[in-house]
Amino acid sequence: MKSILIKNANVINEGKIEIKDVFIINGKIDKIGESLTENADTTIDATGKYLMPGVIDDQVHFREPGLTHKAEIYTEARAAVAGGTTSFMEMPNVKPATLTQELLQAKYDLAAEKSLANYSFFMGASNDNLEEVLKTDPKTVCGLKIFMGSSTGNMLVDDREVLDKLFANVPMLIATHCEDEATVRSSEAIYKEKYGENVPIEMHPVIRGVEACYKSSTLAIELAKKYNTRLHILHISTKEELDLFRNDIPLAEKRITSEVCVHHLYFNADDYATKGSQIKCNPAIKGKEHQAALLPALFDNRLDIIATDHAPHTWDEKSGTYFNTPSGVPLVQHALNMMLEFYHEGKITLEKIVEKMCHAPAICFEIEKRGYVREGYWADLVLVDLDKEWKVTKDNLYYKCGWSPFEGHTFKGVIDTTIVSGHIAYAGGEFDESKKGERLTFER
């Protein structure tokens, strides 16, 4: 592999910003210092720019296999890299669902061939695959995903006896989608009776409301405490759920952790008026009072990780009536830009963005030698020009679905260069696909 010397970068890492040089060789960060003089195949002058660890997105849906009219590993990994995400963890609700070890390995084989970013895949749980789940290797697989509320795909685990067995017996991290299915179905029936198929999109956060989220999250935490399970609850969207999580111990000591997604931080229920079903997702984007509570919970560490839940659908699919429009938003290319917008507005620091998008996922999932700018670690790095502006258009979207809720929006902050496992995968708007990403491994 080619060696790289990055000169004079403002390095954002472990709560500090310092001007440093970084020397990379054989995929790893070999040396961090000042005025480094190592001979390198490539030298990057990063004067005035900011260097941070690559974003680790712990929740994406890349739709392969079986749903590749929406997205595929190749296209979405490229979009991720263009947006500064160097590693992703992908969900099992594809076709066929990832419910056996053979199907799980098939996804890893696809990624090894196609993914420009580093990768890991969740094993999926159903009401009848416990034996397969228990074969999963915690050192090479990010975790087990349980849908305690159905989303895209048919993977709902609603049998309490099965949930007890999973929480009691699975030794690795369990990640949950928490929405109580009975509560959601009851609300859907009420609004279908009132509106038929033409339920206004503004009713989505009412139909999939606070009660459904809180009830399911409470159950997951009850089970985790009962069996001392390592639980990670995905996409928290309500202020009521926030007090379910501890902030009085370090992240590495937590048995129960949480994630918030960029769209729940960025949008609120008022945005349905202009964005409509483009921002229909599960759990729903809710009212301003919920949005306003999420950032403070990030700062006080009740919320541990920022992710995307990147979930693309075609434009035609997103243009149907309420019950025929799938939930999910394409976000992975713009997640870091969304957080940098908050930075420019004075709502969050660069150090906190790096903590929650890079360091915390590495700690939470016990990822081996990633998530930091450290000597001996994999060189997953992103160089950002904070002051340069750019406008989102169809021409600069890399999602296979070909649309984004940010079309026409101008972001301040350009992803200049993305380095994946020591390979310059993206620079100056161009990709180098001569080397693919690496499979993530875990120190468990």
Image (tube, grey):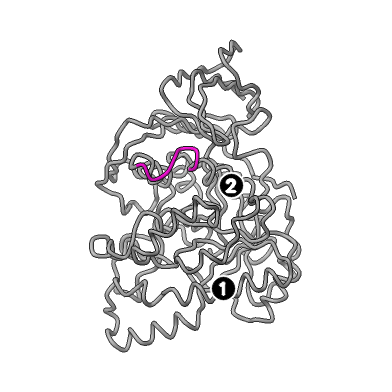
Q: Counting other residues with Cα less than 10 Å from the Cα at mark 1, is it few (<14), some (14-19), or many (20 or more)? A: many
From the viewer's perspective, is residue 186 above or below residue 256? below
Q: Which residues are magenta?
A: 346-352
Please provide percent x and percent y for residue 8.
49, 18
Left or right: 98 as drawn, with respect to 273: right
> Contact (CB < 8 A) between labels 2 and 1?
no
Please provide percent x and percent y for residue 42.
52, 18
Given residues 220 and 368, the one toward you in this image is 220
Given residues 69 and 393, the one toward you in this image is 393
Q: Indicate which disc residue 378 carries.
A: none
Q: Secondary structure at mark 1?
A: loop
Inspect the image, locate mark 2, and give the three-letter code of the amino acid beneath it: Ala
Q: Residue at x 52, y 74 (%)?
A: 149
Residue at the spot of label 2: 360
Given residues 378 and 318, the one toward you in this image is 378
Eye-nearest disc, 2 or 1:
2
Residue at the spot of label 1: 148
Quadrant of image for the N terminus:
top right
Based on the picture, tell me whether residue 102 belongs to the magenta stretch.
no
Q: Residue at x 54, y 21 (%)?
A: 20
Please provide percent x and percent y for residue 297.
49, 56
Q: Residue at x 67, y 38 (%)?
A: 369
Q: Residue furthest front?
A: 248
Corner quadrant of residue 312: bottom left
Inspect the image, locate mark 1, and give the three-letter code of the amino acid beneath it: Met
